[in-house]
Image (cartoon, rainbow, N blue to C red):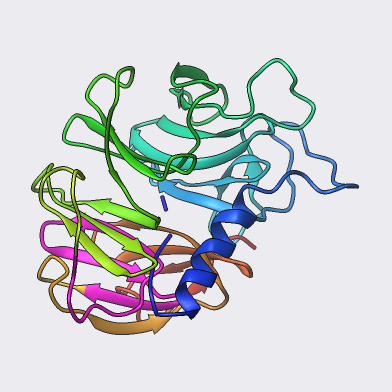
Amino acid sequence: MARHHHVRRLVPLVVTGLLLAACGQQQAGETPAAAGEVTELAHVHGLGVDPADGALYAASHHGVFRVSDGGEPVKVSETQDTMGFTVVGPGHFLGSGHPSPDDTDRPPHLGLIESTDTGRTWRTLSLSGEVDFHALEAKHGQVYGFDSQTQQVMVSTDRKTWDRRARLSLADFAVDPADPDTLLATTEQGLARSTDGGRTFTPVPNAPTLLLVDWPAESTLVAVSPDGTVQRSSDSGATWTSAGSAPGAPEALATRGPSEIYVATDGGIHRSADGGASFTSVDG
C-alpha cells in the first residue's frame, strides 16, 4: 500500500509530489540488478509482510525486494516499476505499475499483475495497458484499487472484471477488516470515509493531517502524517492520537497486527514493535 492526505496547501503539494515522483522513469546511469542480487533499495511504493514466514517485502521503482532485519535488501523480482502492491496470502502478491525501460513487449501500464512465488515471477490478471493502480488492497474476497489514470476507486470480485466507483484525488486508502463497504481515504481535502464500498466519500471531521493509512484490526487504524508522525485510532478513525515518528519523508506503510509497524521513508525502512512509539532501521 500504500499514501495520504491533507492540509490546505502543504498536503496537496506533498501528495501530488509523491504520486508524480513514484511514476518517474529510471534515471540515466542507473543499472538495475538481476533478481537475487543485493542492491540499494530506493523509491519504495509499497510494503507487505508475507504471513508464511513474517518476511517483509518492499515494492519499488526497480522491482520487489525481500528485506531482512539488519541486512541488505535482496532483489527477488524482475526490474519493473511496481507501484500498487499488496500481500494476499502466503507467497501471494498482487501489484501494478510499469515495465522496465528496456521491456518493449509490454504496455506502459501493467494493469493488475499477480505473483504466487513471493514476487519472483508475475503474470497479468486484467487491465493490461489500461490501468495503473497506485494503491491496492485485497480483503473480503475482493480487490480494491485506485487507478491513477482516472483517479477512480475500482473493485473486483474475480480480479478480471471491475466496477468503477468514486472519482477523487487520493494518496492512500484502507478497507475496514470487519466491513467490506467501509473505506478510509487520505485526500487533498482531508481524511474521507466511504460506507458504500467506495461509491461515495464524505469528510471525516477533526482528523489530523495524514499521508498513509492501514487498518490492521477491527476499529484499529495506523496512519502516518507527511512529516513521519505516526497517528493511531481505536474507534475506526473517529479520533486520533499521536505516537512517535519515523525518520524521513514517508513513502509506504505496512502493519503486522496493531503494534508492529513498518514505514519506508527516503532514509530507509523502519520498524516499530511498540505501536509507533519508537523505530529502528531494518534495511541495513
Q: Choose between 225 and 151: the one closer to the eye.
A: 151
The magenta stretch spans residue 119: no
Viewer-side residue, 9 vs 70: 9
Q: Residue furthest right?
A: 29
Could you say where residue 87 lies in the image, as x and y percent from the top left? 37, 38
Q: How many marks?
A: 0
Q: Residue at x 38, y 83 (%)?
A: 244
158 to 19, vertically: above or below: above
Would residue 227 be seen by someone viewing this image from the given angle? no
Which percent across, then down, holds residue 41? 67, 53
Give the residue at x 32% y 83%. 243
Residue 107 visible to an observer of this rendering: yes
The relative height of residue 207 versus residue 168 in the rendered view (above or below) is below
Position of 259 relative to 229 (above/below):
above
Q: Quadrant of residue 223?
A: bottom left
Residue 227 falls within the magenta-colored stretch: yes
In this rendering, position of residue 96 left or right of residue 242: right
Name the residue nearer the viewer: 34 or 55. 34
How far from the left and from the top, in percent, is residue 28? Answer: 88, 47
Q: Quadrant of the C terminus?
A: bottom right
Query: Where is 152 relative to 45, above or below?
Result: above
- Magenta stretch bounds: 203-232
Residue at image location 41% in from the left, 50% down from the top:
1
Across and down, in percent, residue 236 comes to: 13, 65
Residue 92 left/right relative to 266: left
Task: Locate residue 241 relative to residue 32 in the image: left or right.
Answer: left
